[in-house]
Amino acid sequence: MARITAGLATSHIPALGAAADHGKASEPYWVPAFEGYDWTREWEASEKPDVVILVYNDHASAFDMRVIPTFAIGCADSFKPADEGWGPRPVPLVEGHADLAWHIAQSLILDEFDMTIINEMDVDHGLTVPLTMIFGQPEAWPCKVIPLAVNVVTYPPPSGNRCWMLGEAIARAVESFPESLNVQIWGTGGMSHQLQGPRAGLINAKWDNRFLDRLEGDTQELRHIAHIEYLREAGSEGIELVMWLIMRGALGARTRTLHRHYHVPASNTAVGHIVLEPVT
Ligand SMILES: [Fe+2]
């Protein structure tokens, strides 16, 4: 049977990808942001996941105002890095796991989550920057990736509670897949940041760290944070953190923290990263 063995969350700041792509990760400004991922890179080398379910949001690369799926799952065999205005990032093709993705889509829809099924999609920094931060710059990504896109760009995004429930349903879907697979789930985006308006550049380290505290252990407080609190405390783009709750919901009642990293600033945002394992 397939199993979700671990979950992690990470910011997907585009400037981190640009720093890696242009050989700037060793410059003093970027070192503190990148070195928080060293532990995870080593850990992944021994964990060797077969598949990562990568929860992220598209930033007007694959979707725009014409089509806005709340939850979409990528069922294709592969996904190309998107051209976000400067050409595609120089990163490997993202290989999907169509059999598992279709199985999860079927399981979720019959479990009453109305997923959008995507068979052709380019993936932007929301998906490729986490792969770079966790796996570095290999010739090919070391595992298959199932993209799971969430609308957090256009109001209304899904509630944190709905995201948590989706995570629980994803765990049920994975556990019912007959092939033996080591599956991880990653939640990306966040933490506090605001890209526009008078509060542009907002970072709230205290609130971010409290959020990280509550991913650990067995508290379910995070699923009940209202949208208005994300907006007020974490800025207009802090709502991306609901995607972390899909990862957290998929890990079950209780988690243990294996690694945690927080650094400000990187570009005009906070960098947050945590690695969790389920406690059964
Ligand atoms: Fe984002």
Image (cartoon, rainbow, N blue to C red):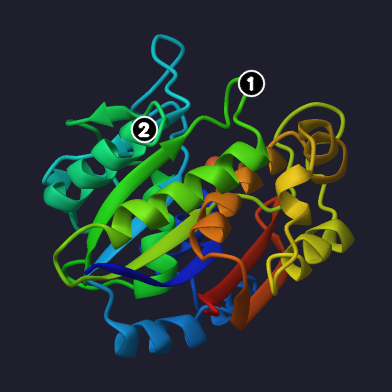
| Residue 148 on image: x %, y % | 37, 43
103 with respect to 32 (left or right): left
Give the label on residue 250, or none: none
Quarter holding residue 178: bottom left
The quadrant in which the N terminus is found is bottom left
Residue at mark 2 to residue at mark 1: CA–CA distance? 15 Å
Q: Earlier in the sequence, mark 2 or mark 1?
A: 2
Residue 156: give its label: 1
Q: Residue at x 70, y 48 (%)?
A: 223
Q: Which residue is mark 2?
A: 72
Residue 70 visible? The answer is yes
Image location (x, y in percent) of residue 51: 25, 64
Ligand 1, by image quadrant, is top right
**Image-quadrant location for residue 144:** bottom left
Tag 2–tag 1 contact (CB < 8 Å): no
What crowding class fits label 1: few (fewer than 14 Cα within 10 Å), some (14-19), or many (20 or more)?
Answer: few
Q: Point out residue 134 in the picture as x, y percentages from the top left corner.
A: 41, 72
